Image (tube, grey):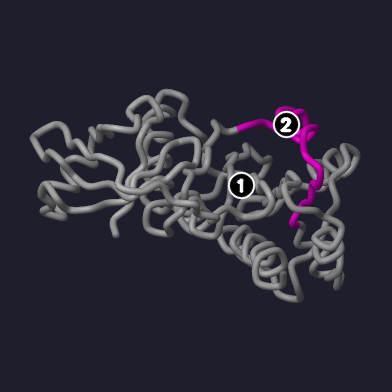
Amino acid sequence: MQRYFIRDATINDETIKIDGEDVKHIAKVMRMEAGDEIIVCSSSGQSAVCELTSVEQGQVLAKPVRWLDEDKQLPLCVTIVQGLPKGDKLELVIQKGTELGADQFVPFKAERSIVKWDKQKSDKKLQRLNKIAKEAAEQSHRTTIPAIDEPCTLSQLIALSESYDHKIIAFEEEAKAGESSKLAQTLQQANENDRFLVVFGPEGGLSDNEVRKLEESGFTSCGLGPRILRTETAALYVLAAISYHFELMR
């Protein structure tokens, strides 16, 4: 059953209003009509099976048939801090990271980031990234869409990290040195509902200066196994490890 996310302001017990691009998807792509059913999710994580009552140009109306009790979120609140990579790699991390359960994405202006975030195009870029996250959340049957922040500096990242229970750095030099236990140890120590922050460098990795300052702020550097992963692969590796530990092993 097709899933759509809507604003809480459009929800009540009688009528749910769907607007924007989802109207075109329902009417033109899916060719749905009154009487068809969809799943609607609110920004607060509620979801309901709804019956379409009106499919018109510019607006779709539906009524709740039954509210669902869905448990689709990772047991931990995981924030991915991704050093700004080249090309469309950030889009890939957000798309696949959403499917794997990340709660938030924070692009990071790392020292070795080749790509620079264009402030004049920031709103348009964030709109595209949020659209990718929304579509990935719908495809993977999530009940919430992860948040996507504007890019942060190192000092902003350190300030952000103060509210987290666990803070780790995926550092390739640790992997090269054979370190392979710190991530597992962190997961063993973590509890459900803890806040988990993971930092990944861009293609050139994190600088020694960045790692030193992060470690001084309570971060733990770790390797991700014996192989060196691409920047767009590393975040997905960690999310998969968290899912395995807290969802498949419980």
Q: SS at mark 1?
A: strand
Viewer can see residue 87: no
Q: Is 128 left, or right, of 34 in this rendering?
A: right
Q: SS at mark 2?
A: helix
Find residue 81 and report its image quarter.
top right
- Can residue 154 be found in the magenta stretch? yes
* Amino acid at the residue labelled 2: Leu
Rendered image: mark on residue 82: 1
Q: Nearer the viewer, mark 2 or mark 1?
A: 2
Q: CA distance from mark 2 to mark 1?
A: 14 Å
| Quadrant location, the N terminus | bottom left
Q: Position of residue 234 (x, y in %)?
A: 63, 62
Q: Are marks 2 and 1 in contact (CB under 8 Å)?
A: no
- Residue placed furthest toward the bottom: 226
Picture residue at 75% right of the left edge, 62% below the top: 172
Question: Considering only vertical position in the picture, is 27 above or below 44?
Answer: below
| Quadrant location, the C terminus | bottom right
Q: Position of residue 196 (x, y in %)?
A: 73, 47
- Can residue 13 be found in the magenta stretch? no
Residue designated by label 2: 160
Q: Nearer the viewer, residue 109 or 50?
A: 50
Q: Nearer the viewer, residue 83 or 180?
A: 180
Q: Position of residue 219 (x, y in %)?
A: 84, 45
Q: Position of residue 180 (x, y in %)?
A: 83, 70
Q: Badge 1: how crowded within 10 Å, few (<14), some, or many (20+)?
A: many
Picture residue at 74% right of the left edge, 56% below the top: 170
* Amino acid at the residue labelled 1: Gln
Picture residue at 50% right of the left edge, 36% below the top: 44
Q: Give, as a single range, the part of the protein colored magenta.
A: 152-170
Q: Is 42 left, or right, of 159 in this rendering?
A: left
Viewer can see residue 170: yes
Q: Nearer the viewer, residue 44 or 211?
A: 44
